[in-house]
Structures are given as structure tokens and as C-alpha cells.
Image (cartoon, coloured by chain):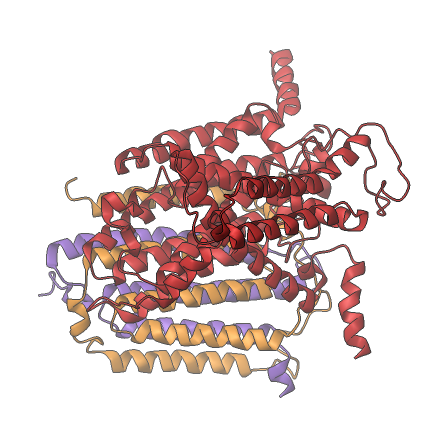
Chain colours: A red, B purple, C orange
Amino acid sequence: MHELIDYIQKYLDSNQTPGAAGNIFWATVYILLVFGGLSVAVIAMNWLERKILAHMQVRLGPMRVGPHGLLQPIADAIKLLLKEDIIPAEADTFVFWIAPFMVVLAAFTVFVVVPFGPTHAITDMNIGILFMLGVSSLSVLGIVMAGWASNSHYPLIGALRSSAQMVSYEVAMGLAVLSVILLTSLHGVDLGLYGIGANDPQAYGTLSMIGIVQAQQEQGVWFIFKFFPLGLIGFFIFAIAMVAETNRAPFDLPEAESELTAGFHTEYSGFRWSLFFLAEYSAMIAVSSIAVTLWLGGWLRPFPGVHGPSIAIPHIWPPADPAAPTGALDFAFALIPGISFLLLAAMCFYNVARMPKHPLFKIQTMGLAGFGAVLGLIGLVMFIPAVRDRVNDIFWFAAKVAGFMYLYIWYRGTFPRYRFDQLMKVGWKILLPLGLALLILTAAMGMRTELWAQFQEVVHGL
Amino acid sequence: MDALLHITTLHYLVLGAALFLLGVIGVLTRRNVVIVLMSIELILNAVNLNLVAFSRYWQGMPGHLGGPGALHGQVFAIFVITDAAAEAAVGLGILIAFFRNKETVNVDEVNLLKW
Amino acid sequence: MNPVATPFFFYLLAGTMIIGGILVITRKNAVHSALALITTLLAQAALYLMLYAPFVAGVQIILYAGGIMVLFLFVIMLISIERAAKERQFNKQWLVGIVAAAALGGLFITIYTTTTKGKELFPEGRMTYGESQNTQQIAALLFDRGAGQYMFAFEIASLLLLVAIIGAVVMAKKRI
């Protein structure tokens, strides 16, 4: 019994991920936390998508089920669970049954390496980004099987189109990711790149997700702003490719209702369809996490290299960890999580004040006020120094991913759909050459001191 | 029992040999060309498993052939995977060309040159 | 860093691979065979992780399970071989095939149970190395200026892939 408590407590002193520390208990706890958080995020995305899309289209969206439709996702889930489970005639039952599981497997396994903080990942694999790209390409298999097993031509065409689109845009994604991996091998302030090939192990780049964010921390800049505009172009290539990868608007021809009657998941109903839906939103969050980690600095706050003068407020600042930065800007940014939750609570209370004063709305008003109170409580708790230091990283990461989710919904409400041949043209003829050029330019920029020295040698030799 | 519980290089080699045998049986006995190609992939995977197991073995050995940098098996395995991809692509292309001509996928019926 | 519960995971993954292999060679439906092969390949990637080869595991997942098997599934769907599932599955020389495989198996067993002068065949090494620099070390072997030995093979492999792409496109086109 004593060893068990020791085993559980031993991890809290280490500064590694549970996978690296070999601690199964904490790894399981982290897995359950990530799984739970992902489910809550998907439910929230369902509500947010309908409300934001509605407001963009100058209407209100769901308003009835809870206060401002907050309980609508729960109603949707209950409906999906109670629906009749239909399997089309002469469909291959085993493959029909296993296809949604493959897509969900691919979408959820990816989160094993997503870094929410310097030690807040389930594990830090040496091949982090390679693992994420590889496992997310397994969802193509599930989609192909779903389309084939439905024994009907709409799903088959939808599945073929969807998989062709996903495979094409994976190439562009891979090239954009490669240019970032090149950037991780620059250390400090633009040291020379003879590290590749020398015996200096520090000068190698890294594929591990935590290593990529730490490289950005070391270089003091988010990679989106590195070698401006090269980082920005890489980010744009990845941002477009990731929307196509997850079959979202404006690249959602394979699953649009006016085109193919819901594409590869036409014949799925009830719980099986909800698995596809879950997998789609999880894949969206996964590729957004890749984009956030690679270009937007992961868990780093904006302007990670600028610290400001060192200040000290008793009991509140600096944080207990002696290695943490203590600048004024750090303190200002450390207050933002709490302030943002208080803002959300203020919005809730403002809407409580705007609720109609009819007796039928009493329960909804109380519900909204309760929700606002919970948000405000979370905001106040985030000001406590012990909580603030631990949750800061997770908050910045989640906020950036939430920004990407808003972008996804914005694209859906704004852009018209791409025709399939236009879609493939963009993937192969525009993004792929752009990605190749970006890779060559990034490599040249990274090695510019060596290239310049060799150029001068050649010129002097002539 | 202890030999079964303590996993050594030999365990991986035996597993590789078993997969190799399954692949050989598949190649020699099946009529469907696609399944023959998949059995060839099984054979290549068994070979890869052997290579990577031996690379791990050499990593544990001292001397100039061993040590932490003795990853030759893993590099070889990466090349084998690359070649398997190329061979699968060409093989399936041949299969499609053949199917377009004869409308069958059985290896037995590839006998146009038989006397 | 020693992995935990190694025998359990090894036997689980080995069992998955063997069952997957048996399913590959015995299923009538080619799609079921392909699914079984995907399971085998993913289990093998996990086995590579146990052998401290994370880069090879990543390459296996991306290329083999996510690339080659998608290609197989596309071709199976394209040539729509439901009719082939009703024909005879095993060819006329299946007995000879099994005898040959059994002979090969006997050869393997003979080799693996031989001990050389009382010592073990593959003795356990004394040193164990972690996986934290695996990708970097493979990159050193491939690309290093002084110590890299596989640069030429790497270039040849890329040329081979180019030839394979052209060959596959030419083979599968309707009109050349």
C-alpha cells in the first residue's frame, strides 16, 4: 500500500511526461483526462457550430432546449442513441461494422503525443509529428471501407472522392511540416548549421512535439513569424491543407448534402453516424493541434522572447519554480486566463439581464445564471498562483486551438464549395509546388551563412 | 517457463519465421492474385522484423560493430519498406492490365503462352 | 529504460500478427484479407516500438498501413471481384505448397534449436539504449558527411520510386 502511494507520488516530483517516466497510473489518468476533454470539446463544438453559423447567417440558431440552446447537443446525442440501426441489404456486415471504429481509432490515437505543456503530454515520442501524420492517414482506410461496405453508389463515389482528396492534401501537409522541422535545428540566435553532420548532438533538429515547441521557446519566436514571410506561407499551406484533410467546407464535396446525399456516411444511422461525427471533429481538433504546435508556439504565450523588467509582488509573483521567467510582461500575460473566463461569465450575466421577464423563462434564466456563475468561479480560481502556474500552458494551447475551431466554422459560413476537379487542382498544382519552393527557401535561409561563405570562396577562387 | 517469459532476440526471430512461413504458404497455394501479393507483403514484413530484431541485438553488443549507433538493420528495414511500396504499385498495375484483358484474377489462368 | 510488462505485450502482439497472417491467407473475400493484413501491419509497428525502433514504426504506419494498404483496397474495389469469391480458392498444387512450407519450417526449427558448443544462439547484450535519439542516429547513418554510409542507397531508392511510379502509371493506363 505504501509503495502504491509512493508510486503515485513519485511522478509528481519528476519533470517528464508519464510515458517517459514509465508511470502507468499517471499515463492512464492523463489518457482519461484527454479523452474526457476531447468529448467535452466535441460537444461544445456541436453547439458552437450551430450558434456561430446561425449568427453569421443573421438568425438565432437553437434557442429552445436550454438557455440559448446550451443543452441542444445533449438532445442530439439522445436522439442519435435512440435511432434505429439500419444495415443495408447485402452490405458486408463485418466491414460495415468495423469502418466507423477505424476512423474513430485514427482520430483518437493521435492525441497520445499532443503537448498541452512542457510535461503535459501522455508521452513524448521521438517521432511525435511523424506519428501524428501517420495515424491521421489511417482514417482514409476507414472511409474507403465505409463507402465500399455500404453497397450503394452514392457512398462509394463519396468514399473514393474523399480518400483521393485526403491523400492529395497529405502531401502538401507533409511538405509544410518538413519546412518547420528544418527550422527546429537552428539553435539559439541563428547559429550556423554545420550541426548537421558535426558531432554536436545539440545541433540536430527534432521530430518530437515537445521538442518543436521547446525549439520555438529557445529561438524566442513562434515559427509562423520565423524568416518572415516563409513561416507565414508554410502556415497558410498547412491551414488550407488541414481543412481539406478533414473534409470540411469549402472542401466538403464528398459529404455535402446537395451533392452526394451525405457521401460515405449515407447509409449509417444513429450511433454509427455519431461515431463518424465524433471522429470528424476529433480530427479537426487534432490537425489544429498540429498547426498550433508547429507554427503558433504550442503552449507559449504571445511574444515568448520579450520579458520586460523583472518585478516581484509578494505571494503572487514570481512563481514558485525558480527557472520560470519573472518579467512584467510575463505577469501581464499570466493574468489573461482568469480575465478571459471572467469575460465569458460577464457575457453570460449580460444575457441573463436580457432574458424576457416572462414566468415561463424562469428556469432558463436560472440555468444561464448558474452557468455564468460556474464560469466566473473558474476564472477566480485561475488567479490563485498555484493553479495559475500549472494551468497557464494548457490555457494558451486550448485558446489557440479554439481560435482554429472558430476559423473552421467561419470558413463554413463564408466560402462556396470547391468542385472536385478544382479541389484536386489546388492540392496538386498549387499547394505542392508552393510547398517544395518553401522547403528549398527555408533550407537556404537556414544555411545562409554557410552558403554565403562558400559562395565567397568560389568567387575568390576565380 | 522462464525461457518463455523473458523475451530475447530469439523470440522475435521465431515470430519472423512463422510469419514468413504463412506468407510462403499464401504465395504457393492461393489462386487470387491480390491475395498472393498480400502474402508477399507478409514475407517482406517478416524479413523486416528479423532485421530490426538483429539491429536491437547489435545495439546491446560492445565493440566496433555494436554500440548505440548500430542501426544498420533499421536503415535496411526502411529501404525494404520503400521497395515494398514500389513493388506493390508495379504489381498492382500489372494486375489491372491483366484483369482488363482477361476479366479474371486467378493465377492459374495466366497461361496464354502454354503449349 | 526497460519497458514494463514486456512478455504480455509481446505475446499479445505476436498472437495478433499470427492470427492476422492466417486470416490473410485463408479468407475468400479479398477485402477481409486486406483488413487482416492491416491489423498485422499495425501490430508489427507496435512490435517495432518494443524493439526501440520508433522511426521504423512510424514509417511502417505511414507507408505500409496508410499507403500500400490503401492502394490494395482501391485496386480490390476497382476490379470488383465478388465473382472470384465464389470460385475455388486454393490451386491444384496446394499439397506440394504445404509440404514445401513444412520443409522450410523444419529447416527454421533446426537452426533455431541449435546451440553452438553449449552457448546460446543470440546471447543477451549487456547494454541497453533508449530511443530518445533514434531518428537523429538514423539520420546520421543516412546523411552524415563522415559517418553516413547509406547516402548512395538513399538516392538509388528515390530513383527506384520514380521508375515504379512511371511503370505503374504506364501499366494501368487505358491507352498509351
Residue C124 horizontal side relative to residue A408, left or right = right
Residue A323 in which image quadrant = top right
* Position of A242 relative to A96 (above/below): above
Q: Quadrant of the N terminus of chain C?
A: bottom right
In terms of depth relative to the viewer, which is nearer, C118 or A427? A427
Q: Nearer the viewer, residue B59 or A91?
A: A91
Left or right for A32, reference A246: right
Asked if residue C144 is positioned above or below residue A227 in the image, the reply reads below
Position of residue A35 in the picture relative to residue A134 (left or right): right
Picture quarter with the C terminus of chain C: top left
Residue sitting at the far bottom: B1
Residue C20 appearing in the image: yes
Residue drawn at (44%, 64%), measured in percent from left and top? Answer: C41
Image-quadrant location for residue B53: bottom right
- The relative height of residue A305 versus residue C149 in the rendered view (above or below) is above
Looking at the image, is A230 positioned above or below residue A273? above
Residue at 89%, 37% in the rendered image:
A313
Q: How many marks?
A: 0
**Is residue A204 in view?**
no
Q: Position of residue A204 (x, y in %)?
A: 66, 41
Q: Name the outermost residue toward the left.
A: B115
Residue A261 in the image: state x and y as whole percent. 24, 50
Residue A440 appears at what percent x and percent y? Answer: 51, 28
Q: Residue A446 sits in which quadrant?
A: top right
Q: Position of residue B2 (x, y in %)?
A: 65, 85
Q: Residue at x 76, y 50 (%)?
A: A387
